[in-house]
Image: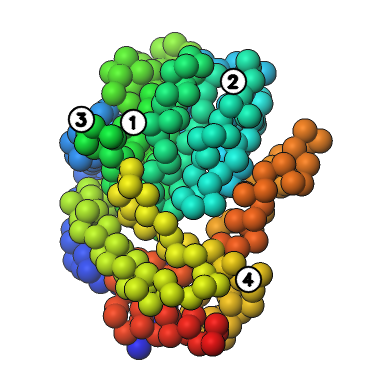
């Protein structure tokens, strides 16, 4: 059996074969490495996939979040609402822009923002909320949008882990994550469901005026060369990465379906273990399983991880400490115990290998090892 990896980029490379070299060779031949034709072609193709929203490519997912907040004209001292349990980028960009962070409690079931906790996190300084669609499943956007409309604040979606997932409204309307709020942000980090072979990201908006502004900010604040309209940054998706993303985008739904099939396999063999909570699939969202994240309920998460490692099975903890307890973000306003769900998840979550190329033999080996541990 092939050695197990959390994400097997080597098998993905084999799947695409010489097509990767052909795509890269085209860029190498025309030598337009920055702002080459592949970038705009990819932006249009991703826009089509997302139902017509404008896509503004940028250098990475963290930049995408920063560009979004800059385009909202937030000022130092304004506040943004951020889930306490997520990756640091979501809060990092707020701190870099001298904004205040208002942490929001998360759900023990779907790991995303807990709607009933929104009012607790609110303050008059809040100008935006950043729901994160964690591990591949949409946050409860209907409640979040309703809250944002009531308060008159913007919604910036962090869709870096869920590109391709759909939110299902009670009316039956379906929207891709990243196209539901005012601005969507995503990352093309290599391990993402749609990943390049370096860094990359994009900002998504239905507003053409806002898209123009985002493009300007990402290009040093200029619309035309050497005419600097506002203070901007240098954040560009390069042509080589865009070429790879163009090749991979048509396979995104197929690869997400393969992930769901792997998750179904995991579910069928792990659902009857009382010490585990398998990922909950919410009715309002499809799930693309960027991660297959269990909760280990009996306090033996780290022991299980060590047991799996002895058998050559990688397992990761996303995330071992909630953001409000991280040294860079800890304040007296949010002591330990402020967000018990986020703190509990940090002690319990464990992600098993998840990618489109897991074989049935590999999946069977993984679930048997987990079951052996609990025997």
Question: For the residues marked 4 and 3, what is the alpha-carbon distance in whole angstroms?
Answer: 46 Å
Question: For the residues marked 2 and 1, what is the alpha-carbon distance in whole angstroms?
Answer: 20 Å
Residue 345 in the image, given as x and y percentages of width and height: 60, 56
- Say above or below: 189 vs 91: below
Q: Earlier in the sequence, mark 4 or mark 3?
A: 3
Residue at the disc numbered 2? 126
Question: For the residues marked 2 and 3, what is the alpha-carbon distance in whole angstroms?
Answer: 30 Å
Judged from this view, the residue extending furthest toward the right is 332
Q: Residue at x 52, y 23 (%)?
A: 128
Residue 366 in the image, given as x and y percentages of width and height: 43, 80
Give 245 or 172, whichever is nearer the viewer.
172
Residue at the disc numbered 1? 180
Residue at the disc numbered 3? 52
The secondary structure type at the circle numbered 2 is strand
Image side of residue 305 versus residue 61, left or right: right
Tell me the quadrant of the picture where the C terminus can be found.
Answer: bottom right
Q: Residue at x 30, y 49 (%)?
A: 286
Q: Earlier in the sequence, mark 2 or mark 4?
A: 2
The secondary structure type at the circle numbered 4 is loop
Residue 224 in the image, given as x and y percentages of width and height: 34, 16
Question: For the residues marked 4 and 1, what is the alpha-carbon distance in whole angstroms?
Answer: 37 Å
Give 139 or 189, whichever is nearer the viewer.
139
CA neighbours of label 4 inside 10 A, class few (<14), some (14 to 19), many (20+):
few
Eye-nearest disc, 2 or 4: 4
CA neighbours of label 1 inside 10 A, class few (<14), some (14 to 19), many (20+):
many
Eye-nearest disc, 3 or 1: 1
């Amino acid at each position: 059996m092939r050695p197990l990896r959390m994400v097997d980029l080597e098998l993905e490379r084999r799947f695409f074969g010489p097509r990767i070299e052909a795509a890269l060779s085209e860029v190498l031949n025309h030598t337009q490495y920055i702002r080459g034709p592949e970038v705009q072609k990819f932006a249009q193709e991703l826009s089509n996939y997302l139902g017509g929203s404008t896509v503004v490519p940028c250098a990475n997912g963290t930049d995408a979040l920063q560009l979004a907040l800059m385009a909202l004209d937030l000022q130092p001292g304004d506040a943004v609402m951020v889930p306490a349990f997520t990756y640091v980028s979501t809060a990092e960009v707020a701190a870099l822009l001298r904004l205040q962070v208002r942490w929001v409690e998360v759900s023990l079931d779907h790991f995303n923002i807990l709607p009933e906790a929104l009012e607790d996190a609110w303050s008059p300084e809040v100008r935006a909320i950043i729901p994160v669609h964690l591990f591949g499943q949409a946050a409860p956007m209907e409640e979040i949008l309703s809250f944002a409309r009531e308060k008159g604040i913007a919604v910036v979606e962090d869709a870096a882990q869920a590109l391709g997932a759909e939110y299902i409204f009670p009316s039956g309307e379906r929207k891709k994550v990243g196209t539901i709020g005012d601005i969507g942000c995503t990352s093309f980090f290599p391990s993402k469901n749609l990943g390049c072979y370096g860094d990359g990201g994009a900002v998504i908006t239905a507003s053409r005026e806002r898209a123009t502004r985002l493009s300007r900010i990402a290009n040093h604040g200029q619309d035309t060369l050497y005419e600097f309209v506002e203070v901007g940054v240098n954040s560009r998706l390069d042509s080589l990465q865009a070429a790879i993303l163009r090749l991979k985008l048509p396979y995104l739904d197929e690869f997400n379906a393969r992930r769901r099939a792997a998750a179904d396999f995991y579910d069928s063999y792990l659902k009857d273990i009382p010490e585990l909570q398998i990922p909950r699939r919410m009715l309002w969202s499809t799930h693309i399983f960027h991660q297959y994240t269990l909760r280990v309920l009996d306090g033996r998460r780290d022991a299980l991880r060590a047991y799996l490692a002895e058998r050559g099975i990688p397992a990761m903890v996303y995330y071992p400490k909630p953001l409000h307890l991280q040294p860079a973000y800890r304040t007296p306003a949010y002591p330990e115990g402020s967000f018990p769900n986020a703190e509990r998840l940090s002690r319990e979550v464990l992600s098993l290998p998840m990618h489109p190329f897991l074989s049935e033999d590999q999946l069977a080996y993984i679930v048997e090892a987990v079951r052996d541990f609990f025997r």
